[in-house]
Image: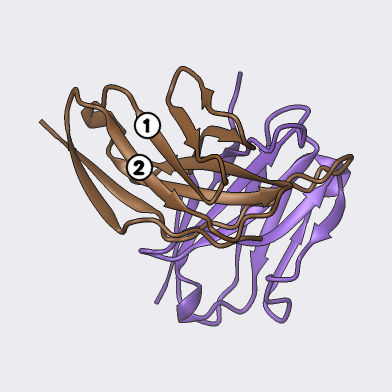
Chain colours: A purple, B brown
Amino acid sequence: EAGVAQSPRYKIIEKRQSVAFWCNPISGHATLYWYQQILGQGPKLLIQFQNNGVVDDSQLPKDRFSAERLKGVDSTLKIQPAKLEDSAVYLCASSLGLTGELFFGEGSRLTVL
Amino acid sequence: DAKTTQPTSMDCAEGRAANLPCNHSTISGNEYVYWYRQIHSQGPQYIIHGLKNNETNEMASLIITEDRKSSTLILPHATLRDTAVYYCIVRVAEMGSNDYKLSFGAGTTVTVRA
């Protein structure tokens, strides 16, 4: 079974530039999550989708972050404009939603200079 | 969600059992205990979860105290590949809901030594 795919794996940008991350969840998984993990900390939930609807985006900094999940499959997370403190690994996860078992991708590491 | 308390770090010897404690003294009756681990440069990986009974799978065992205020994750025969950050999380699993968002703390950094 293919896992959660994310790209790019690494991205370096300058502050005030924009960046987009892509996630393809496991086939059939209705629930998709984006987490932000700053070095030395545990992952922090940014947004949760159920199919193509948003369940929870209370921790998403909406002035600069946006996310969408068109057609209830792939998802994109965008940051515009980026700040230095956005340097982190952005993790995508998906689940069937039946057991609470989340499957994570390897993450996209963002460095903002 | 109830907060959890875990030691910052611990070492264990290869081939021995590793016992990882977690305190969740404010856990509610409908909250499950989940364990995940994160190996360096990878995404977190689900290990096991339970409500009140002890659970075992191919990766680990989960022992939950009778009052449910603490639990222990047991890796029966630790290997070098078990070196990782281990997260203990409590979360409500709402009936009929697909809302299984998990809130991660800092976890325990486990180092398995040869």
> In the rendering, at what x and y percent does residue A57 appear?
76, 66
Q: Which residue in the structure is indicated by mark 1?
A: B74
Say whether residue B64 is left or right of residue B2: left
Chain bearing mark 2: B
Q: Which residue is most to the left?
A: B114
Crowding at dot 2, Cα within 10 Å, few <14 / some 14-19 / many 20+, comes out as many
> In the rendering, at what x and y percent does residue B40 appear?
33, 45
The span from disc 2 to disc 1 (Cα, nearest Å) is 6 Å
Crowding at dot 1, Cα within 10 Å, few <14 / some 14-19 / many 20+, comes out as some
Quadrant of residue B72 within the rendered picture = top left
Disc with the residue nearer the chain's start (2 vs 1): 2
Q: Is residue B52 above or below residue B60?
A: below
Q: Is residue A7 visible?
A: yes
Residue drawn at x 84%, y 57% as measured from the top left: A54
Quadrant of residue B82 within the rendered picture = top left
Amino acid identity at mark 1: Ile
Residue nearer the viewer, A67 or B30: B30
| Mark 1 residue element | strand
Residue drawn at x 20%, y 26% as measured from the top left: B16
Q: Is residue A105 visible?
A: no
Quarter of the image that includes the N terminus of chain A: top right
Say whether residue B84 is left or right of residue B93: left
Circles 2 and 1: CB distance less than 8 Å? yes
Q: Which residue in the structure is indicated by mark 2?
A: B20
Amino acid identity at mark 2: Leu
Q: Is residue A83 above or below residue B38?
A: below
Chain bearing mark 1: B
Quarter of the image that includes the C terminus of chain A: bottom left
| Mark 2 residue element | strand
